[in-house]
Image (tube, helix red, strand yellow):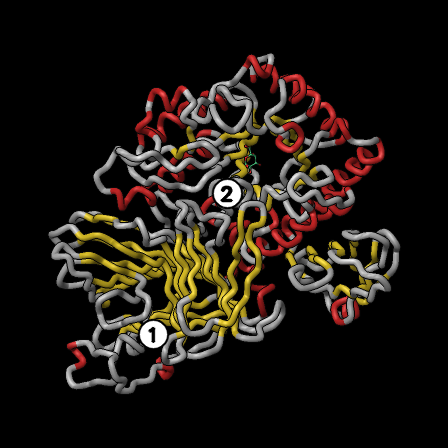
Amino acid sequence: MAIIFDKERKTLTLHTKNSTYQMQVDPYGFLLHLYYGTRTEGCMDYLLTYADRGFSGNPYDAKEDRTYSMDVLPQEFPVSGNGDFRSPALIIKNADGSCSCDLRYKTHHIQSGKYKLPGLPAVYAGKEESETLEVVLEDAVTGVEVCLLYGVLPEYDIITRSVKIRNDGSQEFSIEKVQSASLDFVAGRYDLITFYGRHAMERNFDRRFLGHGAQVIRSRRGTSSHQYNPVMILAEEGTTEDAGKCYTMSFVYSGGFLGEAERDQYEQTRIQLGLQEEQFSYPLAPGEAFWAPEVVMSFSGEGLGRLSQNLHECYRTHLCRGKYRDQVRPILVNSWEASYFDFTGESIYNLAKEAADLGIEMLVMDDGWFGKRDDDNSGLGDWYVNEKKLGMSLGELIEKINALGVKFGIWIEPEMVNEDSDLYRAHPDWAFTIPGRKPVRGRNQLVLDFSRKEVVDAIFEQICALLDQGNIEYVKWDMNRSITDVFSHGTTNQGKVLHDYVLGLYDFLERLISRYPDLLIEGCSGGGGRFDAGMLYYTPQIWCSDNTDAADRVKIQYGTSFSYPVSAVGSHVSAVPNHQTGRNTSMKTRGVVAMAGTFGYELDLGKLSEEEKEEIRSQVKEYHRYGELIQKGLYYRLSNPFKDEIGAWAFVSKDQTEALLNVVMLEIHGNMTNNYVKLKGLKSGCMYQDEETKKVYPADALMDMGLPMPVEFGEYQAYQVYLKIK
Ligand code: GLA
């Protein structure tokens, strides 16, 4: 049993293989949080302390007892208005305008299997590998009913959380803020790790001591965004990759979010993650219910490496879905950096011919094939093929490419519209615009109002008509601006619109994958601007960044690796000098870096020398050889490229019989000192052989002292060492 109710002590305990989570219903019916950490038995209510603290109020039920205060006690789901002045997980605006809410325990249910969330992505798991706890709380005065949902996947050390809010009263109220998960820690000193970024430089690793004063990450952009990834890690001070206690919260949602962390006046810590509260005010009429998106939590007592691996395994096998979930993805060439908008059917076909010659398995025709679209100022919304530009029908092009033995994929951006498009001219009210105002433009385009079903339906029809034109096996789903001018012409409740937009997006994607179950969809938003666990439920891979520079990618992919599996990371070899940075790196280096992802190419293959083509042929062979190990092996970070002279990572098979070490020298100096890369995860006591040099190394020495990297002339050399157990 992963979930246990102790009737006497009124505790609810959640166990995973290596962690325990506990809460307790107190004598007044409040639900207090007791513990989250190393797996243990017993009752942790001894951790609660009581004292009369000035200006910390007391619930009426406590009568003369001034030592009982919601302001200090650890809460399972803190609400606004009951005397807890820390950040609330829930703010309800009642019909009378007050924001008070007093939630008390009503009942709970324990079931085998994992709960589902209507219309929202969520981790899934079978009855034999998961359990669900529902704890129902209610406000007796207003009829606000809150059901806290917990999904426990013991083998993965994963606990998921969500909240269902129901109006069981007789008057409408609105949800002004809801955090899907809130965690209180009564003691400890912690670092907060988050991932900030910008277009073409996403998910930079940022670690700082969590002091007094709230630290906040958020997106006001309507998408999870480049600026912060919806993930927080709380690590005990001193925690490393391999040791120390740490916790993560990862949001399974693709819209705006809010993550808060604060050390309070009593040195207690609270972290929370959930929906962005600005521009959010969700009305609930009597009888209606609202589901908050899911937060996935994990605890590791063995450092950050294990914490990441917990999420990788869970996301790869219990969040991603579809035919390609467990498959090494086809190696592709994408036309974007090869020719941008400047192509014809003939030139695309020629790219496919080159691809076939090199063993590349799929051709993706990127932006520019539809409507009037020779630059990024027009055409979005008109998803019909520009046969004049292609010089042939799409069906013909696909057939020709398939005849080469190459699969065909295509780029779309369904959520967008240009003012210069037939769609916009026919339906200007389908775009987000505020009456009487000129909208903010982004890449000269507007955002379609996906909170309206008729808009989603109309675009869905267009996209299906497109996909029915031939054997299209892959779609790159892009989204190239932040959302502004949030005003829907289809509702009077504007506070719902941003969330309903995301629900509309998910509805579209769900319909798409059920109609085309064999389609591989890659998410994208100006590169990695919507790289989140929500999208991974529909698209098992996401274009990691528009920055294809190998040296920058080492950092971007390092940050990404804290939460997302390598199988989700879209990564390609592109031309040099790199189009985003102007940097030169070798084909080898670009290959090694792109192999830490779904692997492909994004350059004009026709312009390469014979020598470079030969290198690509051998990279393709290598990826076929290592693909399974890369996708399904355990991922180890072996350096911090934000601090170290090298970027290093390894994939180790679960049975520890093989490992692939990858190193990129990020700095070079005169009279260079040695870089020894310490391996991880090998089988202690065993010997491993480098397949290429045939040298044999003891696993323990490789892990304790490391492998010296050769010092060669020139920056950004890369090494890939394949080790097999002897
Ligand atoms: C975005 C994507 C790119 C490319 C362009 C096309 O920026 O991230 O990969 O598809 O759009 O316009």
Total tally of numbered discs in the picture: 2
Q: Regarding ligand 1, which quadrant of the image does it lie in? A: top right
**Residue 527 is drawn in which quadrant?**
top right
Question: What amino acid is found at the position of numbered circle 2 in the picture?
Answer: Arg
> Is residue 313 visible to the viewer in this orientation of the structure?
no
**Place of residue 694 in the rendered image (x, y in percent of width and height, measured from the top left):** 88, 56
Q: Quadrant of residue 204?
A: bottom right
**Which residue was labeled with disc 2?**
321
Q: Nearer the viewer, residue 309 or 256?
A: 256
| SS at mark 2 in the image | loop
Mark 1 secondary-structure assignment: loop
Q: Who's the residue at 45% across and 20% down the image? A: 465
Compared with 504, 252 (above or below) is: below
**Label placed on residue 659:** none
Mark 1 lies on residue = 74
Q: Residues within 10 Å of mark 1 (few under 14, many from 20)?
A: many
- Left or right of residue 149, residue 348 in this image: right
Q: Is residue 250 above or below residue 324?
A: below
Between 177 and 420, which is closer to the camera in this rendering? Answer: 420
The location of residue 716, given as percent across then percent down, is 76, 52
Q: Nearer the viewer, mark 2 or mark 1?
A: 1
* Residue visible at 25% across and 49% down in the picture: 282
The amino acid type of the residue labelled 1 equals Pro
Residue at position x 48%, y 34% in the image: 443
CB at mark 2 closer than 8 A to ligand 1? no
Task: Specify few, some or many for label 2: CA neighbours under 10 Å numbering under 14, 14-19, or 20 or more.
Answer: some
| Picture quarter with the C terminus | bottom right
Q: Mark 2 vs mark 1: which is more N-terminal?
A: 1
